[in-house]
Image: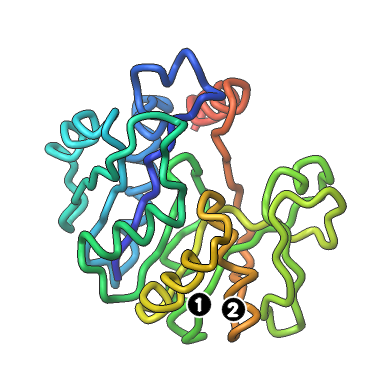
Amino acid sequence: MTAVILAAGYATRLYPLTLDTAKPLLDVAGRTILDRILENVARVPALRSVVVVSNARFYDQFCSWASTADYGVPVTVLNDGSTDNTNRLGALADLRFAVRRYGIDDNTIVIAGDNLFDFELAEFAAFFAAIGADCIAVGRVDDPAQLRRTGVVELDADCRVLSFEEKPAEPRSHWGAPPLYLYRAATLQQPLDEFLRSGADADAPGAFVPWLIERGPVYAYRFDGARYDIGTLESYRAVQALFATH
C-alpha cells in the first residue's frame, strides 16, 4: 500500500502563517501536522511507501522535512510545478500526477495534508482489505453547520455509499466524510484519468466519489474518533490548544 499526502495547496485562509510556511509543516504541540499524520499512517501494516505532493513554492521545505523523516518506509516528495493559488492543479489532478510520476500501482490511501484523526488508520485499512472495494471514511456529525463544510454521504445497511455531496446546503444525513480515501490500484488508473478528462472538478478531493458510485460499489468505514480539519486560523489555534493538553 502507498500513502499519498495531498500537500500542494496554498492555505490562503491561514495567512499570514502560511505565507512562508506550508500548512502541513505548521507546528502542533511540538510536531508538524504532517508528522502527526504519518505517525498514524506508519502503523498501517501493509504500508510500503509515502508520497507527499507539494508545489514549487514549498518544495524545498518539504524536502528538508523529508530528509529527517523516519517512518520505516521511503518518503518521497514530488513537486507539482504550481507556484501560487491561481495556477494550482487541484487535489485530484495532484493525485493523478503522483500516480504517474511515482508509478503507483498498488492500493493507495489518500489523505489531505491538513487533517488529523485520533482513530487508527490501520483499522480503516483492515476494513478496506476485508471489503475489497474502494472505501471512504465517515464519522457522525450532529452539527448541521459543520456538515455544510464537509462531504456528506448516505449509506445503506451494509455501509455501501448511496450518495456523496460535497459541502451541501441541505445535508441529507449525519455522516460526514473527511478527505480520507482508500482506492484500489486499478481505480487510480483509467477511472481517474477518465474522470479528469470529463472536465469534472479536479480541486475537491471528494468530487471523485460520486462519479465512482455510479460505476461500482464504494463502501464507508464508520470511525468513532475525532477528526480535526485545520482550515482556518481559529481551527488551527483550537487544535494547538487541544494537542497541548494530550
User: Which quadrant holds residue 4?
Assistant: bottom left
- Quadrant of the image containing the N terminus: bottom left
Q: Secondary structure at mark 2?
A: strand
Residue occupying the point 56% across, 24% down:
13
Q: How far across and how far down the image is residue 208, in percent?
A: 55, 65
Q: How is the image coloured?
A: rainbow
The crowd level at tag 1 (other Cα within 10 Å; few <14, some 14-19, many 20+) is: many
What residue does disc 1 label? 134
Residue at position x 29%, y 76% in the image:
106
Residue 32 point in image, percent of width and height = 35, 32
Residue 115 in percent (x, y) is at 50, 43
Q: Is residue 17 above or below residue 217?
A: above
Q: Is residue 67 above or below residue 132?
A: above
Comparing 100 with 128, the one in front is 100
Report if the CB atoms under discs 2 and 1 are less than 8 Å apart.
yes
Residue 80 vertical placement versus 230 (above, below) = below
The residue under label 1 is which amino acid type? Asp
Determine the image quadrant of residue 173: bottom right
Q: Earlier in the sequence, mark 2 or mark 1?
A: 1
Give the percent coordinates (x, y) of residue 182.
45, 69
- At x 41% / y 70%, what residue is drawn? 193
Please name the amino acid that badge 2 sits on.
Answer: Val
Query: Which residue is at 48% across, 29% downward?
Result: 11
| Residue at mark 2 to residue at mark 1: CA–CA distance | 5 Å
- The residue to which callout 2 is attached is 218
Disc marking residue 240: none
* Horizontal relation, residue 43 to residue 85: left or right: left
Q: For the image shown, how many numbered marks are present on the structure?
A: 2
Q: Nearer the viewer, residue 56 or 135?
A: 56
